[in-house]
Each structure stands twice: as C-alpha cells, then as structure tokens.
Image: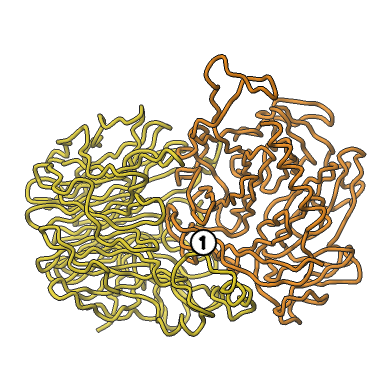
Amino acid sequence: MRYSVALVVLLAAAAQAGQLATGNALGCEHVAFVRAGVVGGLVGPARECAAGDNRDIRCCLAPDGAIWVPDSRDCLVYRIKDGQARIVAGCGVKGYRDGPADRAMFDFGVGSYCDVETNCDAAGNIYVSDMMNNAIRRIFRKQESAPPGRKDSASETRTTRPDGTWWVETVSGGGKKGREPKKGEWIPASELRFGGASRFAVADDGTLFFANYGGIYQVKEGKATRLATHEELQAQLGPKKPIADWHVGGSHITPDGVFYWVPGGQEIYRFDTKTGRAEIVAGEGPKQTDAATVRESGFHTVDVVYSRDASVIYTGGGDESVPRRIHNGTVKHLQKDGTFKAGKEQDRDNWRLYQVAFLSPEGDLYTFCGIYAWAGWLVKVRFAKE
Amino acid sequence: MRALVLLLASFGSMAAAAELVVGEPVTIAPECVRDGALVQATPAAAFGKKVYLIVWSDGSRMLGKETADIYCARVEPGTGNSLDPKGIVVCKAENLQSRPAVAFDGTNFLVAWEDLRNGMDHDIYAARVSEEGKVLDSDGFPVVKRANNQAWPAVAFAAGNYIVAWMDARQYPVYGIYFARVTPEGKVLDPEGLPADVEDAAKIAKLKPVARDSVAEPSAAERRATTETWMGDKDYWWQPLASRTCPAASSNGTSVLLVYTKEYPFAGSGRPGLAATLIRGADASVSQPVKVAGGPSPAWTGKGWALGGPAWQSGWTPTPFLGAAFLPETPVEAKESASPTRKPSAPEGRTPGDAGATVDVVKMFGGGYNVGKGSTASFPSAAASNGRNTIVAMQYAWREKSGDKRPVFAILALRVSTEGEFKLLDPTPLTIASATSPQSVGHPAIAAGPKGEYLLACQSDSDVAKCPIIARIVREE
C-alpha cells in the first residue's frame, strides 16, 4: 500500500514537472453534468447526471482517476469514473452525521454561500469542507484485515483491503464551539474551534492546512495546531487584510510546504510553513485587470486552482466568467481563439468557461461552464505543451 | 380566460372552514429491516377501492453494495394502519431502483420507478400490484429501455390506459419529457416513448458540430472535429437549450396533466419555471406545452387543476411560498409573472398573489434557507384533491435562530378550496411532522381516500440505520 501511494505521488510529480501543458487551449469537452437541477441528484452516464447545484464548488482528481464533485445544495458528493456518475456520500439532507457514506449528512452552506471544496490525498482519501458544521470530513473506504496468518511480504504489516463500503468521518472540528490552540500547541482536532473552512489544502500524507478567522491551522493525525495567528499574518500582509479563505478563493499546499490561500477570492497569499514567512503573491491591482506584474493584477472574487508546485495558477468564477492563467510572472485572460492575452475581461473576446474547478497533473483545466448562479457542466480544457 | 385565477388569501373567510385534523403517525413497514437497517426513501401514495398503497425505495445506495429496491405496503383507510408491516417486495433487481410513483386503474395499482439494473443508465420499469398486495409483475417490466437516462417517472390513469412519463436524456445535451401508455394488463403501447415536451431538434442540430447522438466516447477524428472546436460562445452551454425535468402527473379521468420544470442555461433571460402539457389517455395526443404558475404538484379538482407546492418568488435569491395556483382543464399559458412577488409595489403586469393562493413560509418560519439562485424544486411537494378541496404539502427547512442553529425540517400542509372559489382555507400551514437535525422529515406523498380523508406519508430519518416511512390520516372535522 505504501509503495503504491509513493508510486502515485512520484508519477504525479513527474507529470507535473515535465509535462504540464501551458500553451494555448486546444479545445474543451463536456465531462459531466447537464444543466438541470434535480432534487436528490441523478446519476448514470456522467454527461447526463444532474446535481442540485455546483456553483462555487471545487472538485478533485483522485489517484485512481475518479473526479469527486460535491453538490452544494443537496449536500451530496458525486464520484465520476469511467464515464459514470454515482453519489457516494450524503443522504440528501442537510445535517451532521458521520458513518456509512450513503447515510452521512453534510451542511455545505446556505444560498449563495454554498462554497464547498473537495481534495484528496495520495492514498485516495477524499476530504470535504463542511462549513456550516465547522468541520472537514473525510470520505474513505473502510479497510478490513486479511485472513489471519497472511502478511504483506513487502511491508511485513498486516494486509488490509477495502471492504467495499464507503464511510465518512470528521477529521477536523465537529460542529461544536471548540477552542483555539496557541501557536505550536497541539490539541485534539475534534476540539478545534475553527475546525473547518470552505477552502483548505491537503498534503500527500493527508495533513490539512487552512486559513480561518484565527489564522492558519494544520491538522495531522487527529491533532490540530495553529501555524500562524491572525495578528502575525496581518503584520506581514497588511493590517486590514482578511485572513479567512471562504466563499470563492482556494487553498493549496505545495510539496515543499508553501501554503497558498485567497481570502474572499481577491488577493493570493502564500505562507511558508517552515519559515513562517507570509507574502502577497497577486491581486493588489484593480479588479479584473491583468497588469504588468502578477502582484499588480486584480481579481474580483474568483475561484483559484493550482498546479502541484503552484507554478501555474488559474482563476475564474465568482464574479469573473473568464479563466485567467498566472504563469511565468504574468496574468493573462483566455481568449475565444484559445490564446492568452493580458487586459481587462470586459475588453476582450473571451472564452467564457466560468468557474475553475481543478487542474489535472497534465495541466488540463476543469471548469464549470455555466453562469453565475447556475449549476453548470463540468468541462475539460486541454492545452498545448510549450 | 386567464391562465390563472388570482386570489389573495381572505383571512376572514377562513374562519368558517372545517379544521384539519391530523391522525397519529403510523410506521408503515417497521419490520422491513434489511442488513440491520430500516432505510426507506421517496414515498409515493395512491388510493384504490379498499386500501391505500404506499411505495418507496428501500435499502442502501452504498456505492458498490447497492441494495436500494422498490417496496410497497397497503394502508387501511380510516385508521391509517399498515396492513404489510414487513413490506412487499416489488422489485429486487441489481443495482439501484428508486423514485417510485404509483396510480390506480380501478382494479390494480401500477408502480413505476427509475432503474439502474444495467449499471450504465436509468430505464423506467413498472409492475402491477393488486389491492390484495400481490405483485403481478415480479421485478417489473420495462416501460422504456433505451440508451441514455430515462428517469424520474410519473404515472396516472386516464381513459383506459396508464400514462407513464419521465425525463429522458436521449436528446443530448438536454433532457426532455417523454411518455408511454401502459394498459391495465401491463402492455406497453409506446415502448420507444412519445415526446410530451422536448427541445427543438433543429435548434440542437444547428449547434451540433457532428453527430453526437450517444454518450459514447468520440473517435480521435471526431474528437478533433468536435470537442476541439467547442470553443467560444457558440458552444452548447451558452445556447438557450432547455432541459425539461422532474415530471409530476394527475388525471381527470380522460387526460393526464404533466407538470415539470423547464430550465434554460441563461441566467439573464430565463430562470427555471414550470411548464405543463395535457395528454389524452385514449389516443396519446399531446397539447401544446405552456408555461404555468404555482407549484410542481398537480391535482385534479373537478373543475380544473390545482398546481400545489412551493411557488418561487422571482429575483436574485428566490424564496418559496407554499400554496397553489389554479389551471383550467385545458392548460393555457400563464401570464408573464409566474412567481409571486413580495412587494405590493410590484412592476406593472405583476400582482401580488399572482401564483394563486399562497402563504409566505419564509416570513412565517423566520427565513433561514435561501436555497440558492434559480432554484425551483428544492423542497419536494405533493398535492391531492378530495373534490371539495385540495391539500398541498411541502417539505420545508429552516435554521434555528439560536443555539447550535441546527436545521429544522417540517412537512407543511394547507388546503385550498376548490369547491367554490379557489382560495386558501388555512391561514397558516399546518405542521404535519417536524424534526431537528440530525433527524429529519421529508418527501411528502399524499393520496385522497374515502369520505374526504387523505393519507399523508413522508420519510422520517432518525438515525443512520433508521429512516422509515411514516403516514398519517388527515381529515376535516
């Protein structure tokens, strides 16, 4: 198991390092969901499935190639694999309940603020932000031990395998008020006061990182700590800078431990978890503008997705309908002819793909093609290799 | 004639109405425990001559270990007692069977459901059940079995045939409403399905780069010719192609009214709304689809149709009203305002109460759930008429104002008089059932029974392993 996880990580890293496509757009194709809201969801062929709402959500690509998509309105989580869509988690009722995935309850939010993010670790566990419950939940396949006497020859540990059932458990927070750890103090993750944020990042080993009202938090193996306080971050970023990454935005952790986050979807920050240094990456300029530098460019409440090492960042969604790419020190809007050009969104003949959802290891951008306020179709945009 | 009878609630006239009395809840199939759990969902109900029949989807949707099947149980009128506490298996095929609907033909019931037994796409299956509780078509027969999804069935009986309708994805990339006639003997007269309301094929063809009739993966050549040219605002997702979804059906004896949601991909020029079409049971002729007001659950009143359930206020963040609108027997297009407005100073052409007789449940229960922009069908509803009036029920939810601010769930019901003037009989909705998260109630189903009574069923979730269908007799006294 550990070897397979390591292999997945290595393959993903190799794909990211050598073959990330950052050229012009070659085309896009419909991957999943139709423009039809269906209470309780509808599964079957991926391009015919329907959810209640997938606005301001982020999806993830699991190591097995499955795409995980939350439905913010009905509080369900879909799995798209081999052209088929299935609901894995959630019973369709808002609430808070761990246990068998099909009977679990989530509470992703209310109305326009149904932000929900989905991430996965290298082992294929899926993590979902459950904002109204102040929690981050994990969707996983329950393991069962192999028959007695059998050992995994490679690891000399008892072999386990999925028993076929999917479960949901809380890994951070838990719907209660909780308490705040001091910086460096570790407390049970279930007691963490701000135990969840609508945006969060997951490292390969399942460690969680997120920015909430008290600062930046880390959750690992059932324990939680605060990496930086709100005050410490504002001292570096600016006295009035918001810290909590909620509603649009998007968080990310690179393999070398740099945490990115985007409070309110406007300015992109990063925090080095090793040094404690925080800085503004982008977004200080006028809204919807591609300026001479990344930092001078401006965003208007956008969703943000990252390549593994954050060398390529895409924005789009929220109040901007056109994806933008941040790469090699520039910010550019995607045009209808597939090229990228700098400028203002309203001045351009743009390619309206709306809301970015995730970036594959190869550099394919997945977006929701709808319009603000509407559930959309999940579309894959493929780019040329430079 | 106007499409809609406009009536505001006249609270003064309500005092004379008989009170609605709700009986004790009865668990319909408490002994139907499977794999240690009692998980029953999305009930539907109909009355025959002697008994009610409640149908539901029973079992787990656990990926890879799906056991969701179709079950039913008979309920005694008058007492509301279950006659089949162990439940009756209607279909136990592989994979998922869900969203059952039921109607009665004078002799037997027909239960229809969406079925994923092929593991690829949903088909519509059906089975007859006698009033004695005998399943006449074990595991069901296919009503429609094509590639693509056929889902969300609705069923009613008219002029000697059942009309089974469903939402159908055969017309990529949108859903349309199709139907088939099924005889009381279980013969499907239209096995390919007939269109009730579908998108203009010419409009789709005009946009279609190359043939993409199926969901099969295109070849490399097709991919170059198609997907790589799907750019800009000429793409499907920017065209005003409308999906028609989630049909509900009611019969007046000769025809069946289908009410469904019609959506457009543009937020600015068309929000989801309700549409209706009438199908004659005898010859399957279809009326011109029209836009209608009110809620998504139809009931024949003897004079026309009551469209009950949540009616949605228009606007950026629409909120639901509970009530009903009146639709003439032959549906006609609703006026522009299909949703209730909350402000007395409504724009010209809109009148408060345009959706008929409605109650502002958001105001009444303190708001709480803004369910999101463009929503029309977040709260399942049901309606039935006993000839004198129509009862409308809706699942609703709000959030506690204090404490943990947990979601509160309720089944709300109110009556609309359909005997004389079309008007509200209940100044406030009656709470039929309620629960606070993590417990919940939802998915109401109603059937009109003998002596003016109703059976109102819903799912009642109290634990991971306990979500039975419960039912109550509701009568006027």
Instruction: Name the subunit of mark 1.
Output: A
Q: How many marks?
A: 1
Query: Between B384 and B340, which is closer to the camera in this rendering?
Result: B384
Spot occupied by residue B288 in the image (x, y as percentages of width and height): 28, 81
Which quadrant would residue A265 be assigned to in this image? bottom right
The residue wearing badge 1 is A33
Q: Residue at x 51, y 43 (%)?
A: A89
Q: Residue at x 51, y 73 (%)?
A: B265
Q: Which part of the image, by quadrant, shows the N terminus of chain B? A: bottom left
Q: Chain B appears in which tint?
A: yellow
Query: Between B263 and B124, which is closer to the camera in this rendering?
Result: B124
The chosen color scheme is by chain
Spot occupied by residue A220 in the image (x, y as percentages of width and height): 73, 31
**B273 sits to left or right of B16:** right
Spot occupied by residue B60 in the image (x, y as percentages of width and height): 39, 38
Vertical arrangement, residue B293 with respect to residue A171, above or below? below
